[in-house]
Image (spheres, grey):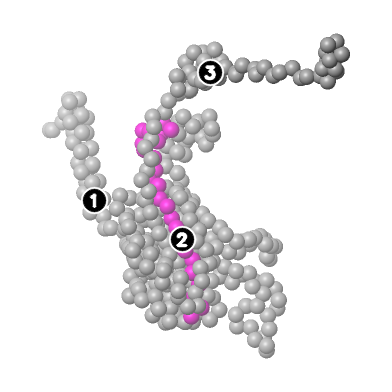
Amino acid sequence: MKPSLFQTSPSVRRGSILAGVVVACIAFVVVFSHAPPPRPILVLPQPYHPPARRAAWPSRWIPVKPSWGWLWRLKEWVLGRPKPIDLVVAIYEFKAAPESVLAGLALGEPELTHTNGLRIWRLGDAELNALRRRLQDFPDSRLLGSPRCSTADRIECSLFQGESFPLSGAMQRVGLMIDFYPRVRRDATELTTAIVLSEAVTNLPGTTAQAPSSGKISILTNLAVATRIQIPKGQGVFLLEARPDAAGPRRIGVIISANQPRPKPVQSPKPKVRRGPESAKQFRPQSQCPKPLPPPPPPIASPAPSSPCATSCATRQG
C-alpha cells in the first residue's frame, strides 16, 4: 500500500506543493496569453449607463487628504504614475443630406457601419488635420464646440456643457455630455466613450398646422452614442451619425484625438524637517541668504539760504 501525500516526509510534501503551484502558473500564462484580442471597434447598446468603477487597490485605501500627501508621493515613487492622456473632441453639425455629407468628406469606406446609421473611421493624425481643414470650408456645417480634458490610465473623465432646468418634477440636464474611460497601453489606447447631445425645444419635428405643438418644453436628443474603440498611437477617430430617416435630429460628426504626453519623472519623497527661526537662518543655503543692502549715500550739504535781512544789516554796519 502506497503512503498518501500527508503520510510522506515534509520535504516531499513541499516539493509536491511547489510543483503544483508552478503547473498552475504555467497554465494561467498559457490560457491568458492566447486570449483573443479585443475587438477594434464596439458599439455599446443604448441607453448606456457607465458602470461603477473602483480605483486601483493602493489608491482606494489612501485617504484623499493633504496630510496624506507623502503617502501618495510614495505610492507614485514605488509603483509609478498612471500614464497620462490628453483627449480633444470637436463636435460638428451638418445640415445637408447624409449622402451629400459622405460624398463631400471623401473619407472612403468606414471601418464600421452600424444599423442605427453610425459610421466610424480610425484615421492618422495627418488625416485628422486634413479633415479639420476640410470641415472649415464644408458647406452647411458649423463647429458646435471643442472641449478637451487631461486624464490618465483608468481614471474616468466627464464633461458637461449646457444648462439644467426643471422638467416633469425633476431637474434635467440639456446640452453636451461626454464620459471618457481610457485604458492606456504602450502602443494603443482603449477608449470607452459615451456622448449625448440634446436641446430643449417647444416645437417638436413633425408638427404641422393641423397638429400644432402643445407649447410644452421637451428634450430633443440629436446624438446618443457609446463606443469602445482601440485607438493606435498616432491615430484618432471620426464618428458620423447619418441616419437617412433623420428628419428632425441634426446630423452630428465627432472628432476624437488621443495623445499620450511624456510622463514627468517622479521625485523620491523627502520628509520635511521643521526648524526654528534661529536654526533656519543657520542652515539656510548660501543661494537663499538675503544680500546685504548697500550703505546709504552720504547726505549732500546744501548751502545756507541767504536772508535779505542779514544782507541789509551788513550794509548798514559798513
Disc 1 element: helix
Rendering quarter of residue 269: top left
- Magenta stretch: includes residue 82: yes
Q: Which mark lies nearer to you, 2 or 3?
A: 3
Q: Which residue shows up at 50% across the image and 61% down it?
A: 146
- Magenta stretch: includes residue 84: yes
Among numbered discs 2 and 1, the one appearing first in the sequence: 1
Q: Which residue shows up at 53% across the image and 71% down it?
A: 222
Q: CA distance from mark 2 to mark 1?
A: 34 Å
Q: Which mark lies nearer to you, 2 or 1?
A: 2
Answer left or right for 88 relative to 202: left
**270, above or below 312, in the image:** below
Image coordinates of residue 23 in percent, x first then y, are 19, 41
Rendering quarter of residue 209: bottom right
Q: Which mark lies nearer to you, 3 or 1?
A: 3
Residue that carries the numbered disc 3 in the rendered image: 292
Picture disc at residue 89:
2
Magenta residues, as a range? 73-96
Image coordinates of residue 227 in percent, x first then y, are 42, 63
Q: CA distance from mark 3 to mark 1?
A: 68 Å
